[in-house]
Amino acid sequence: MLARRLLRPATARQLTVPLLAQSYSSSSPAPKGTPDIDPSALTIEKTASPKPLLPAADLVFGRNFTDHMLSIEWTARDGWLPPRITPYQNLSLDPSACVFHYAFTCFEGMKAYKDPSNRIRLFRPDRNMHRLNRSSSRIALPTFSGPKFVELISKFVNLEDRFIPKQKGYSLYIRPTMIGTQNTLGVGPPGSALLYVIASPVGPYYPTGFKAISLEATESAVRAWPGGVGDRKLGANYAPCIVPQIDAAKRGYQQNLWLFGEEGYVTEVGTMNMFVAWVNEEGVKELITAPLDGTILEGVTRESILELARERLVPEGWKVSEEKYTIAQMKKAADEGRLLEAFGAGTAAVVSPVKAVTYRGEEIKIPLSPGKETGPLAEKFWNWMLAIQYGEVDHPWSQVISE
Ligand SMILES: Cc1ncc(COP(=O)(O)O)c(C=O)c1O
Protein backbone atom coordinates (compact mmCIF):
# COMPACT_ATOMS: atom_id res chain seq x y z
CA MET A 1 0.00 0.00 0.00
CA LEU A 2 1.16 3.50 -0.78
CA ALA A 3 0.90 4.65 2.81
CA ARG A 4 3.12 1.77 3.86
CA ARG A 5 5.74 2.74 1.30
CA LEU A 6 5.74 6.34 2.48
CA LEU A 7 6.07 5.56 6.14
CA ARG A 8 8.83 3.69 7.87
CA PRO A 9 7.81 1.08 10.44
CA ALA A 10 6.77 2.91 13.58
CA THR A 11 9.19 0.81 15.58
CA ALA A 12 11.90 3.08 14.15
CA ARG A 13 10.20 5.79 16.27
CA GLN A 14 10.32 8.11 13.31
CA LEU A 15 7.54 9.04 11.00
CA THR A 16 9.01 9.56 7.58
CA VAL A 17 6.79 11.81 5.54
CA PRO A 18 6.37 11.62 1.81
CA LEU A 19 9.51 10.40 0.18
CA LEU A 20 7.47 10.44 -3.00
CA ALA A 21 6.84 14.15 -2.59
CA GLN A 22 10.20 14.86 -4.12
CA SER A 23 8.86 13.83 -7.48
CA TYR A 24 5.96 16.30 -7.41
CA SER A 25 6.39 19.63 -9.05
CA SER A 26 5.82 22.37 -6.49
CA SER A 27 3.35 23.93 -8.87
CA SER A 28 1.25 20.82 -9.47
CA PRO A 29 -2.34 21.66 -8.57
CA ALA A 30 -4.34 19.32 -6.37
CA PRO A 31 -6.43 17.40 -8.90
CA LYS A 32 -10.16 17.66 -8.34
CA GLY A 33 -11.74 14.52 -6.99
CA THR A 34 -8.72 13.12 -5.11
CA PRO A 35 -9.75 11.16 -2.02
CA ASP A 36 -10.89 12.95 1.15
CA ILE A 37 -9.91 11.75 4.61
CA ASP A 38 -11.26 8.22 5.10
CA PRO A 39 -11.83 7.17 8.73
CA SER A 40 -12.72 3.62 7.61
CA ALA A 41 -9.13 3.16 6.38
CA LEU A 42 -7.66 3.94 9.82
CA THR A 43 -4.97 1.59 11.08
CA ILE A 44 -3.95 1.55 14.73
CA GLU A 45 -0.60 0.44 16.05
CA LYS A 46 -0.56 0.57 19.82
CA THR A 47 2.53 1.42 21.78
CA ALA A 48 4.49 -1.41 23.35
CA SER A 49 5.72 0.88 26.12
CA PRO A 50 2.89 2.90 27.66
CA LYS A 51 4.07 6.02 29.49
CA PRO A 52 3.53 6.40 33.21
CA LEU A 53 0.87 8.98 34.09
CA LEU A 54 2.15 12.13 35.75
CA PRO A 55 0.63 13.26 39.03
CA ALA A 56 -1.96 15.95 38.27
CA ALA A 57 0.09 18.56 40.14
CA ASP A 58 3.06 18.03 37.79
CA LEU A 59 1.20 18.73 34.54
CA VAL A 60 2.76 21.64 32.67
CA PHE A 61 0.98 22.94 29.59
CA GLY A 62 2.27 21.34 26.41
CA ARG A 63 5.25 19.56 27.95
CA ASN A 64 4.03 15.97 28.19
CA PHE A 65 2.28 14.02 25.51
CA THR A 66 0.14 10.92 25.32
CA ASP A 67 1.25 7.50 24.02
CA HIS A 68 0.10 7.91 20.43
CA MET A 69 -0.37 10.32 17.54
CA LEU A 70 -2.73 10.43 14.59
CA SER A 71 -1.20 11.13 11.16
CA ILE A 72 -2.65 11.52 7.70
CA GLU A 73 -0.45 12.20 4.72
CA TRP A 74 -1.61 14.02 1.63
CA THR A 75 -0.14 14.26 -1.83
CA ALA A 76 -1.38 16.35 -4.71
CA ARG A 77 -1.57 13.23 -6.86
CA ASP A 78 -3.29 10.82 -4.48
CA GLY A 79 -5.19 13.06 -2.06
CA TRP A 80 -5.50 11.99 1.58
CA LEU A 81 -3.84 8.64 2.29
CA PRO A 82 -5.07 6.15 4.93
CA PRO A 83 -5.00 7.64 8.44
CA ARG A 84 -2.72 6.02 11.00
CA ILE A 85 -2.57 6.02 14.77
CA THR A 86 0.94 5.08 15.80
CA PRO A 87 3.07 5.39 18.91
CA TYR A 88 4.07 9.04 19.52
CA GLN A 89 7.31 9.49 17.59
CA ASN A 90 9.66 11.88 15.82
CA LEU A 91 8.98 13.06 12.31
CA SER A 92 11.71 12.59 9.76
CA LEU A 93 11.76 15.37 7.16
CA ASP A 94 14.20 16.39 4.49
CA PRO A 95 16.00 19.63 5.44
CA SER A 96 14.60 21.19 2.28
CA ALA A 97 10.98 20.51 3.35
CA CYS A 98 8.98 23.67 2.68
CA VAL A 99 7.64 23.86 6.26
CA PHE A 100 11.12 24.82 7.45
CA HIS A 101 11.67 27.62 4.96
CA TYR A 102 8.38 29.22 4.06
CA ALA A 103 6.22 28.57 7.12
CA PHE A 104 3.75 26.15 5.59
CA THR A 105 2.22 25.33 8.93
CA CYS A 106 -1.08 25.92 10.65
CA PHE A 107 -2.67 24.41 13.72
CA GLU A 108 -5.61 24.24 16.11
CA GLY A 109 -6.05 24.15 19.85
CA MET A 110 -8.98 22.26 21.35
CA LYS A 111 -9.67 20.18 24.45
CA ALA A 112 -11.28 16.92 25.53
CA TYR A 113 -13.03 16.97 28.90
CA LYS A 114 -14.28 14.27 31.28
CA ASP A 115 -17.89 14.72 32.43
CA PRO A 116 -19.31 13.61 35.80
CA SER A 117 -20.20 10.21 34.27
CA ASN A 118 -16.60 9.81 33.09
CA ARG A 119 -17.59 10.24 29.44
CA ILE A 120 -15.27 12.13 27.08
CA ARG A 121 -16.53 15.35 25.53
CA LEU A 122 -15.30 17.77 22.87
CA PHE A 123 -16.40 21.40 22.78
CA ARG A 124 -17.64 22.68 19.39
CA PRO A 125 -15.05 20.69 17.38
CA ASP A 126 -16.76 21.74 14.13
CA ARG A 127 -15.52 25.28 14.77
CA ASN A 128 -11.90 24.12 15.01
CA MET A 129 -12.29 22.10 11.81
CA HIS A 130 -13.74 25.08 9.98
CA ARG A 131 -10.89 27.30 11.18
CA LEU A 132 -8.19 24.74 10.31
CA ASN A 133 -9.57 24.47 6.78
CA ARG A 134 -9.58 28.26 6.49
CA SER A 135 -5.99 28.37 7.74
CA SER A 136 -4.70 25.59 5.48
CA SER A 137 -6.39 26.90 2.35
CA ARG A 138 -4.81 30.33 2.91
CA ILE A 139 -1.31 28.84 2.67
CA ALA A 140 -2.01 26.45 -0.24
CA LEU A 141 -2.26 23.38 2.00
CA PRO A 142 -5.08 20.91 1.40
CA THR A 143 -8.53 21.01 2.97
CA PHE A 144 -10.50 18.06 4.32
CA SER A 145 -13.90 16.99 5.63
CA GLY A 146 -14.33 18.39 9.14
CA PRO A 147 -16.73 15.68 10.39
CA LYS A 148 -14.42 12.91 9.14
CA PHE A 149 -11.44 14.43 10.88
CA VAL A 150 -13.46 14.82 14.10
CA GLU A 151 -14.35 11.12 13.82
CA LEU A 152 -10.64 10.28 13.68
CA ILE A 153 -9.73 12.68 16.49
CA SER A 154 -12.46 11.03 18.57
CA LYS A 155 -10.96 7.58 17.98
CA PHE A 156 -7.52 8.89 18.89
CA VAL A 157 -8.78 10.62 22.05
CA ASN A 158 -10.66 7.49 23.11
CA LEU A 159 -7.46 5.51 22.79
CA GLU A 160 -5.79 8.04 25.10
CA ASP A 161 -8.64 7.92 27.63
CA ARG A 162 -6.35 7.20 30.59
CA PHE A 163 -4.48 10.48 30.00
CA ILE A 164 -7.59 12.65 30.42
CA PRO A 165 -7.63 13.78 34.04
CA LYS A 166 -11.02 13.37 35.73
CA GLN A 167 -10.93 16.45 37.94
CA LYS A 168 -12.86 19.51 36.82
CA GLY A 169 -10.55 22.14 35.37
CA TYR A 170 -8.26 19.47 33.93
CA SER A 171 -8.44 18.36 30.32
CA LEU A 172 -6.59 16.86 27.39
CA TYR A 173 -5.26 19.61 25.13
CA ILE A 174 -5.45 18.48 21.49
CA ARG A 175 -3.16 19.96 18.88
CA PRO A 176 -4.09 19.23 15.24
CA THR A 177 -1.29 20.51 12.99
CA MET A 178 -0.82 20.62 9.24
CA ILE A 179 2.55 21.09 7.57
CA GLY A 180 3.78 21.27 3.99
CA THR A 181 6.34 18.49 3.49
CA GLN A 182 7.43 19.01 -0.09
CA ASN A 183 11.18 18.78 -0.49
CA THR A 184 12.03 21.88 -2.45
CA LEU A 185 13.43 25.35 -2.01
CA GLY A 186 11.15 26.50 -4.82
CA VAL A 187 8.46 28.81 -3.49
CA GLY A 188 5.14 27.34 -4.54
CA PRO A 189 2.15 25.30 -3.37
CA PRO A 190 3.29 22.18 -1.49
CA GLY A 191 2.77 18.95 -3.41
CA SER A 192 2.61 17.01 -0.18
CA ALA A 193 1.47 17.64 3.37
CA LEU A 194 1.06 15.95 6.72
CA LEU A 195 -1.89 16.45 9.02
CA TYR A 196 -1.19 15.13 12.49
CA VAL A 197 -2.62 15.31 15.98
CA ILE A 198 -0.83 15.11 19.30
CA ALA A 199 -2.34 15.56 22.75
CA SER A 200 -1.13 16.78 26.11
CA PRO A 201 -2.88 16.41 29.50
CA VAL A 202 -3.23 19.82 31.13
CA GLY A 203 -4.13 21.18 34.52
CA PRO A 204 -6.45 24.05 35.37
CA TYR A 205 -5.36 27.48 34.20
CA TYR A 206 -6.16 28.93 37.63
CA PRO A 207 -5.16 26.24 40.13
CA THR A 208 -5.56 28.66 43.04
CA GLY A 209 -8.33 30.90 41.70
CA PHE A 210 -8.38 33.66 39.10
CA LYS A 211 -5.32 35.84 38.68
CA ALA A 212 -6.10 39.11 36.92
CA ILE A 213 -3.43 40.29 34.48
CA SER A 214 -1.86 43.65 33.57
CA LEU A 215 -1.44 44.50 29.90
CA GLU A 216 0.81 46.78 27.95
CA ALA A 217 -0.90 48.39 24.98
CA THR A 218 1.65 47.64 22.27
CA GLU A 219 2.45 50.25 19.65
CA SER A 220 5.94 49.11 18.65
CA ALA A 221 4.65 46.04 16.81
CA VAL A 222 1.43 45.12 14.99
CA ARG A 223 0.02 41.58 15.23
CA ALA A 224 -2.26 41.72 12.21
CA TRP A 225 -3.43 44.13 9.54
CA PRO A 226 -6.18 44.37 6.93
CA GLY A 227 -5.49 42.00 4.05
CA GLY A 228 -3.02 40.05 6.20
CA VAL A 229 -3.43 36.64 7.80
CA GLY A 230 -4.17 37.53 11.43
CA ASP A 231 -7.55 35.81 11.11
CA ARG A 232 -5.92 32.44 10.37
CA LYS A 233 -4.15 30.19 12.83
CA LEU A 234 -0.85 30.09 10.97
CA GLY A 235 2.42 29.30 12.74
CA ALA A 236 3.81 32.40 11.03
CA ASN A 237 1.54 34.62 13.16
CA TYR A 238 2.97 33.46 16.45
CA ALA A 239 6.79 33.62 16.34
CA PRO A 240 6.84 37.39 15.63
CA CYS A 241 4.78 38.06 18.77
CA ILE A 242 7.34 36.59 21.15
CA VAL A 243 9.82 39.49 21.23
CA PRO A 244 7.09 42.08 21.96
CA GLN A 245 5.81 39.70 24.66
CA ILE A 246 9.29 39.44 26.21
CA ASP A 247 9.66 43.24 26.08
CA ALA A 248 6.30 43.72 27.81
CA ALA A 249 7.20 41.08 30.41
CA LYS A 250 10.47 42.92 31.18
CA ARG A 251 8.38 45.95 32.07
CA GLY A 252 6.15 43.84 34.32
CA TYR A 253 3.16 43.17 32.04
CA GLN A 254 1.77 39.68 31.49
CA GLN A 255 0.47 40.24 27.96
CA ASN A 256 0.45 42.61 25.00
CA LEU A 257 -2.75 44.39 24.16
CA TRP A 258 -2.51 44.50 20.38
CA LEU A 259 -3.60 47.80 18.87
CA PHE A 260 -4.07 48.65 15.25
CA GLY A 261 -3.83 51.88 13.31
CA GLU A 262 -3.47 55.55 14.19
CA GLU A 263 -6.87 55.37 15.87
CA GLY A 264 -5.48 52.77 18.33
CA TYR A 265 -8.17 50.14 17.74
CA VAL A 266 -8.12 47.41 20.37
CA THR A 267 -7.81 44.03 18.63
CA GLU A 268 -6.63 41.08 20.74
CA VAL A 269 -4.74 40.36 23.94
CA GLY A 270 -1.74 38.01 23.72
CA THR A 271 -3.26 34.93 22.08
CA MET A 272 -6.80 35.67 23.22
CA ASN A 273 -9.74 37.68 22.00
CA MET A 274 -10.46 40.80 24.05
CA PHE A 275 -13.77 41.79 25.65
CA VAL A 276 -14.58 45.07 27.37
CA ALA A 277 -17.68 45.85 29.43
CA TRP A 278 -18.60 49.47 29.95
CA VAL A 279 -21.49 51.85 30.24
CA ASN A 280 -21.33 53.35 26.77
CA GLU A 281 -21.67 57.05 25.87
CA GLU A 282 -25.46 56.54 25.58
CA GLY A 283 -25.59 55.25 29.14
CA VAL A 284 -26.23 51.61 28.12
CA LYS A 285 -24.31 48.66 29.62
CA GLU A 286 -22.39 47.18 26.72
CA LEU A 287 -20.17 44.15 26.21
CA ILE A 288 -17.95 44.90 23.24
CA THR A 289 -15.37 42.95 21.26
CA ALA A 290 -13.59 43.76 18.01
CA PRO A 291 -15.35 42.60 14.81
CA LEU A 292 -14.08 39.81 12.53
CA ASP A 293 -12.63 42.21 9.99
CA GLY A 294 -9.70 40.00 8.98
CA THR A 295 -7.37 41.17 11.77
CA ILE A 296 -8.95 39.10 14.56
CA LEU A 297 -8.74 35.34 15.07
CA GLU A 298 -12.23 33.83 15.04
CA GLY A 299 -12.00 32.45 18.57
CA VAL A 300 -14.31 29.59 19.48
CA THR A 301 -14.47 31.01 23.00
CA ARG A 302 -15.22 34.49 21.59
CA GLU A 303 -18.10 33.16 19.53
CA SER A 304 -19.45 31.16 22.46
CA ILE A 305 -19.26 34.10 24.87
CA LEU A 306 -21.04 36.31 22.35
CA GLU A 307 -23.80 33.73 21.94
CA LEU A 308 -24.18 33.24 25.69
CA ALA A 309 -24.21 37.01 26.21
CA ARG A 310 -26.92 37.49 23.58
CA GLU A 311 -28.99 34.75 25.13
CA ARG A 312 -28.46 35.54 28.81
CA LEU A 313 -27.29 39.16 29.20
CA VAL A 314 -29.36 40.95 26.57
CA PRO A 315 -32.61 40.10 28.46
CA GLU A 316 -31.00 41.82 31.48
CA GLY A 317 -30.57 45.05 29.50
CA TRP A 318 -27.06 44.55 28.14
CA LYS A 319 -26.06 45.54 24.63
CA VAL A 320 -23.67 43.06 22.95
CA SER A 321 -21.51 44.48 20.18
CA GLU A 322 -18.94 43.31 17.67
CA GLU A 323 -17.64 46.77 16.85
CA LYS A 324 -14.35 48.57 16.56
CA TYR A 325 -13.36 50.44 19.73
CA THR A 326 -10.20 52.31 20.66
CA ILE A 327 -7.82 52.45 23.59
CA ALA A 328 -8.75 56.15 23.90
CA GLN A 329 -12.39 55.15 24.37
CA MET A 330 -11.33 52.70 27.07
CA LYS A 331 -9.36 55.42 28.83
CA LYS A 332 -12.23 57.92 28.59
CA ALA A 333 -14.65 55.34 29.99
CA ALA A 334 -12.24 54.67 32.87
CA ASP A 335 -11.79 58.41 33.54
CA GLU A 336 -15.55 58.88 33.61
CA GLY A 337 -16.13 55.82 35.83
CA ARG A 338 -17.93 53.95 33.04
CA LEU A 339 -15.40 51.14 32.53
CA LEU A 340 -16.82 48.02 34.18
CA GLU A 341 -14.58 45.11 33.22
CA ALA A 342 -12.18 43.65 30.66
CA PHE A 343 -11.07 40.10 29.95
CA GLY A 344 -9.33 37.94 27.39
CA ALA A 345 -11.08 34.83 26.02
CA GLY A 346 -9.53 31.66 24.64
CA THR A 347 -9.50 27.87 24.93
CA ALA A 348 -6.58 27.73 27.39
CA ALA A 349 -7.91 29.99 30.16
CA VAL A 350 -11.55 30.34 28.98
CA VAL A 351 -11.51 33.86 30.43
CA SER A 352 -8.56 35.85 31.68
CA PRO A 353 -9.60 38.89 33.76
CA VAL A 354 -7.65 42.11 33.11
CA LYS A 355 -6.97 44.52 35.98
CA ALA A 356 -4.99 47.23 34.16
CA VAL A 357 -3.80 48.38 30.75
CA THR A 358 -0.82 50.68 30.41
CA TYR A 359 -0.99 52.93 27.36
CA ARG A 360 1.80 55.42 26.59
CA GLY A 361 2.99 55.19 30.18
CA GLU A 362 -0.43 55.83 31.74
CA GLU A 363 -2.28 53.11 33.58
CA ILE A 364 -5.95 52.50 32.87
CA LYS A 365 -7.30 50.75 35.95
CA ILE A 366 -10.03 48.18 35.39
CA PRO A 367 -12.40 47.31 38.23
CA LEU A 368 -12.54 43.83 39.78
CA SER A 369 -15.14 42.39 42.15
CA PRO A 370 -14.31 43.31 45.77
CA GLY A 371 -11.72 40.91 47.17
CA LYS A 372 -11.52 38.97 43.89
CA GLU A 373 -9.14 38.69 40.95
CA THR A 374 -12.02 38.81 38.47
CA GLY A 375 -14.98 40.94 37.60
CA PRO A 376 -18.52 39.56 37.81
CA LEU A 377 -19.01 39.10 34.06
CA ALA A 378 -15.78 37.19 33.47
CA GLU A 379 -16.67 34.94 36.41
CA LYS A 380 -20.16 34.37 35.04
CA PHE A 381 -18.84 33.40 31.59
CA TRP A 382 -16.23 31.17 33.15
CA ASN A 383 -18.89 29.30 35.14
CA TRP A 384 -21.27 29.05 32.18
CA MET A 385 -18.57 27.80 29.84
CA LEU A 386 -17.12 25.23 32.25
CA ALA A 387 -20.58 23.84 33.07
CA ILE A 388 -21.08 23.21 29.33
CA GLN A 389 -17.57 21.95 28.60
CA TYR A 390 -17.60 19.49 31.51
CA GLY A 391 -21.10 18.29 30.66
CA GLU A 392 -22.67 19.45 33.93
CA VAL A 393 -25.51 20.91 31.89
CA ASP A 394 -26.92 19.54 28.68
CA HIS A 395 -25.88 21.72 25.78
CA PRO A 396 -25.51 21.11 22.04
CA TRP A 397 -21.98 22.62 22.03
CA SER A 398 -20.63 19.73 24.09
CA GLN A 399 -20.29 16.51 22.13
CA VAL A 400 -19.90 13.13 23.86
CA ILE A 401 -17.33 11.09 21.95
CA SER A 402 -16.79 8.10 24.27
CA GLU A 403 -17.08 4.83 22.42
C1 LIG B 1 -4.39 34.99 18.31
C2 LIG B 1 -5.47 34.25 19.02
N1 LIG B 1 -6.62 34.88 19.29
C3 LIG B 1 -7.63 34.26 19.92
C4 LIG B 1 -7.52 32.95 20.34
C5 LIG B 1 -8.66 32.28 21.04
O1 LIG B 1 -9.26 31.32 20.22
P1 LIG B 1 -10.05 30.10 20.83
O2 LIG B 1 -11.12 30.66 21.67
O3 LIG B 1 -10.59 29.37 19.65
O4 LIG B 1 -9.08 29.30 21.61
C6 LIG B 1 -6.33 32.26 20.10
C7 LIG B 1 -6.16 30.87 20.56
O5 LIG B 1 -6.35 29.97 19.83
C8 LIG B 1 -5.29 32.91 19.40
O6 LIG B 1 -4.15 32.27 19.13
Image: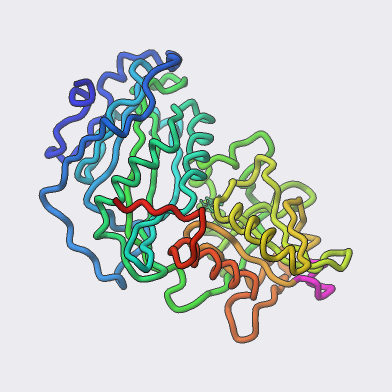
Magenta range is 331-339
Q: Is the residue 171 above or below the residue 158 in the image?
A: below
Give the vertical position of 7 relative to 311 (above or below): above
Q: Could one spot residue 236 in this view of the protein?
A: no
- Identify which residue is drawn at 57% across, 62% down: 255
* Of 16 and 387, the residue lying toward us: 387
Residue at 45% in and 45% down? 108
Q: Is residue 391 left or right of residue 302?
A: left
Q: Position of residue 358 (x, y in %)?
A: 68, 67
Q: Residue at x 71, y 67 (%)?
A: 361
In terms of image quadrants, where is residue 46? top left
Residue nearest the viewer, comparing 177 with 184 = 177
365 magenta-colored: no
Q: Look at 13% across and 38% down and name the residue there.
A: 12
Q: How many marks?
A: 0
Residue 253: where, in percent of width, then height? Answer: 58, 67
Is 402 positioned to the left or the right of 86 in the image? Answer: right
